[in-house]
Each structure stands twice: as structure tokens, then as C-alpha cells.
Amino acid sequence: MIKEIKEPVIEVHNLTVVYDRKPAIWNIDFTLPKGQIIGVMGPNGSGKSTLLKAIMGVVNANTGWVKVAGEDIEGVRKRVSYVPQRQSVDWDFPATVWDVVAMGRFALKGVFKKLNADDRSVIEESLKKVNMYTFANRQISQLSGGQQQRAFLARALAQEADIYLMDEPFAGVDASTEEAIVQLLKQMKKEGKTLLVVHHDLHTAQNYFEWLVLLNTRLVASGPLTEVFDTALLEDTYGGTLTTLTKVAELLDKNDMPMRHK
Amino acid sequence: MSSDFWIILTACLVAALNALLGSFLVLRRMAMIGDAISHAVLPGIVIAYFLSQSRATLPMLVGAAATGLLVTALIEFLNRKVKLQSDASIGISFTFLFAVGVIMISYFGTNIDLDQECVLYGEIAYVPMYNIAVGGMDLGPRQVWIVGSVLLFSIVSVIWGYNRLAVTTFDPEFAASVGINVVFWQFFLMGGVSLSTVVSFESVGAVLVIALLVGPAATAYLITNRLTPMIVMAIIAGVMASVIGYYLAKYLNASIAGAISVVIGIQFAITIVIVSIRRRYNRLKYEPSQNAPV
């Protein structure tokens, strides 16, 4: 099930990325609608992160091309914000929360430019939106996982982009942070932003996303959630592992236990 | 001016230069690449010496910077393309280049006024013997001017590229996503390390320069929590160790570079002790309110 749309915000054509002779993503071809919260799902090692990095041009594609807002990524970088996986950086780096968020502003400026009053107020606003303003002067090594994720999101907000690519923003955060992030995403969607979010929890996916991309090195499906969230397609994506997942979910439902108790 | 003054000044300049660049190396987990560069510049220096038939500074700087960047590229190549582990890539690259340099020195030995001993350990005590004079006026040792100008150049470069260096060090993937050329800034830094290594060579040698690159930066890392204070603190620690080290060497009648390195080690050890005591004290202080809402 691959639904093509007209005037897509992101268009990926025949995209293949190979690491060390093993393909991470293979011949991916899809179009994504503007102004939606889009989930990218698939098992571990299915190429979700690679897809995001390839869209941003952080990794080179072996074949194929990507167009963002109808242009090559180099022409629209300032309109696109990428949030890497939280675990991809060293949180013992000597910086405060403010310093990290400020990187989102410096990104838009030339070498050797200072932050002006406008930049500072954008940073402040971004911190407030993720409830981290009171932590602005805290050293990043003193943050919890959820706070680290919020700091990353604030840095992305400070870029004031139109399109956001987020790699596992819900990984290893507590329930309250997850809820706060979901609310933030919905707010951003209301402001007309497009959000592409890598996610791996099937149970919450239905509540978070309007459009779903299912990936398992190859593209399994891309389309509105209602059409894509289908047992056959999900099984195709996750292979045999899905049956175990479903069984566990049914079991939990019967006992009326909260699904995401952490 | 007394030779004490010139030796201490040279040591301080060398320490400040290495602390400045070493701070970035430590944060990038590339301290051993600094070690690799400091050894691998040797063949570059010998070739530059051989071609220019002099110990003029400029050819040496060019030769060293070229081999420094070469070894960085070689390590990157072995690590990324050949898929060799990074420590193995470093180990094989720099020992090879260093050994080539050693062979060159011994082969051309009779014609070349480069001393292996000096290459390995440096001799900062000889610094005041090579003064430069303009129009009969003594301007102080050549080394002071060379190291001083490289330090000035490095400070200006780091201030110019500060934000880019910071973001490519902390989060290279994010930096690439906003269009910053991560590889350029990597080589920018490595070029700087190559330059600083070669000008530190005559003073402290190839082995001890790594102590100056890593030690003060590591000490500063333990006691600061932002990048700028860390760099400033690293420079202060390096300068302090140079002064104390000089007098220690004088008192013991020992190698100056060796004494400075020992002081850097002691400095680091004392810092660890202070930091862990402080941590324990803070924990005790906050214990009763640990469960208070955040």
C-alpha cells in the first residue's frame, strides 16, 4: 500500500543506501503530505534512522534522490530541522541546556556571528515550549533522559523550521515527557509544520500519527494511518515478531493493565 | 633578560597553545590522534629540512602541517574505508610515519643537524641560545617568537570558528544536517594540532607534547561545565604547570620538559581527589532533601 500524493512536502525516489555492502534501505520510493504528523516505523535495523539521515544528506545515497519542498535539500536546509537520536551524543560535554539550544540559532548564521536579542528571545521561547526554561543554566550531564530529549527538541524549535525530522524522540523518556512531547507535536502541526517521527511502539502509534511509513529495508507501506495500520501490512513489516507483540497486547488488555507502565 | 625568564615564557606559550587545541581533542575523544600527529610530523620536518637545506621555520611548518594532515587522512581512511578499528588505525599509521622519519634522520645523519634525542625529548633549556636580533637589537629567543605567533594565530582561528568547532564536536550529525562541513572543521583542527606540535617539538619533544595536549584539558574538563571556561582553565593549568615544572627541574637539576609533564600529572591527580571530595560533600549536604519535588 503506497499512496502517492500531489505536491508532496518530501519526495523520495528510488533511494538506496548501502553500508559496507549491506543495504540499510533499498529502493525506497514515496511521497509525503504537508502539515501532518507522520510516523516512520519498522523493526530494529530496518533503516529508519538511515532514511532520515539520507533525507538530510547526512549520509550519501548510493542511488536515487530526495526532494524537500520541491527542491534539493541543500537549497532548503534552513527550513528543515533534524533531531538525531538522543544517544548519539556525549551528554558529558561541557555545555548548559542554553548552550545546546543556542546551537539551533547558530546553525542559521555564518561563521563568527554572535547571537542578537531576537535570537535570545527565540531560545527563551523554545525552552519555555518544552518546559525547560528553569533548567536553562543546568549542565547537560545533570539532565534526566526526558530532559535531554526536551533540550534536543528545544534546539530544533529554535531553528524555526517548517519541516521536522525526529529520530526516536520517545525512546527512553518517562510517560509524562512522552505526553508533553505529543502535545508539542500536535501544537506544531496546528502551526502548519510537517513532522516526520521515527517511532517503535505500535500501541501508541495509532494515537500519534495520521500518516504512516512502514519500513523494513524496503518500503512496505506509506499512506494514511487508517489504511496502513493493518495486520497484514504490519506483519509484513515486522515478520514473525508481530504475533508475539499482538499476543502480549491482548493479554494486557484482558487484565486491563496500562499498556505503557514505566 | 635572564635565560630563566625566556625558558619559562617559552614553556608557558607552548603549554597555552597545546591546552587550547587539546581541549577540543579531549572532547572529541581524539587525544591519541594528537599523539599520532606529534610523531607523524617527523618525516615532514626531515623532508622540509632536506629540501630547504636549513632549519628555517617556514618550510618546517609547511612540512609538518602536510604530514600532520596526511596522517589524519590516513587514519580516517583506514578507519572508515578499510573498517579497521580506530585505535589500530592510529597505531599503524603514526608508527609507520615516525619510523620513516627516524630512518631518514639516521640515513642522512651526517648531513643533517637534527638530533633524535632532541626530537624525542626536546630541549627547552637551549631556547635562549638562539636569539633573533634586528638591527643589533636583541629581540629574545627565536622560539618565543615562533610559538607566540602560532599561539596568536590559533587563538584568532579558534575565536573565528568557535561555534562551528563547538557544534561539530558536540553533535556532528546535527552539524551536518544544518549544512556545516564537518570534515572541513575536523581538518581545520588537525591542521592546528600539526602546527602546534611542530613548534612545540624543539621545546618538549614528540613524546611529552601529548602530556601538554591532554593533561591540562583533562584537568579543566573535571572542574568546569561549559566549553569556554574549560578552555580558559586548561590554559591556566598548563601555564601553572610550566612555571612550577621549571622550578622543580631547576631544584632537582632534571629535564625541564619532564618536570612539567610530571607536574601536569600531579595537578590532574589532585584535581580528581578534590572533585571526588566535593562530590561526596555535596551528596551529604543534599541527602535530606533528596526526595523533594524537582
Image: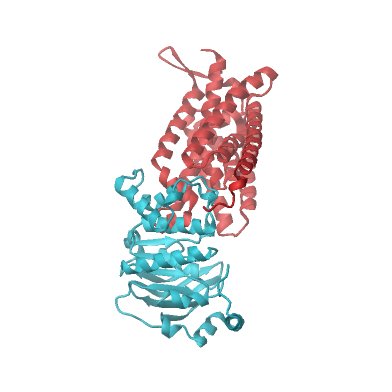
Pick whichever, B206 or A172, lies toward us. A172
Residue A193 to residue B218: above or below: below
Q: Is residue B54 visible?
A: no
- Name the side, left or right, on which B112 lies relative to B195: right
Q: Report which colour depicts chain A.
A: cyan
**Quarter location, residue B120:** top right
The C terminus of chain A lies in which quarter of the figure?
bottom right
Residue A244, percent from left and from top: 62, 81
Quick one: which residue is furthest to the bottom in this view?
A232
Q: Which chain is red?
A: B
- Above or below, comparing residue B188 to residue B242 in the picture: below
Q: Which quadrant is the N terminus of chain A positioned in?
A: bottom left
Task: Say if A172 sits above or below A97 in the image.
Answer: below
Asked whether A209 or B109 is in front, the reply is A209
Residue B196 image position (x, y, % from top left): 51, 35
For the residue pair B82 and B169, the one nearer the viewer reads as B169
Measuring 66% from the left and 30% from the top, which residue is drawn there?
Answer: B262
- Return the x and y of residue B76 as percentages of the image width and height: 55, 53
The one nearer the camera, B72 or A77, is A77
Q: Residue at x 54, y 49 (%)?
A: A142
- Residue A192 vs B159, above or below: the answer is below
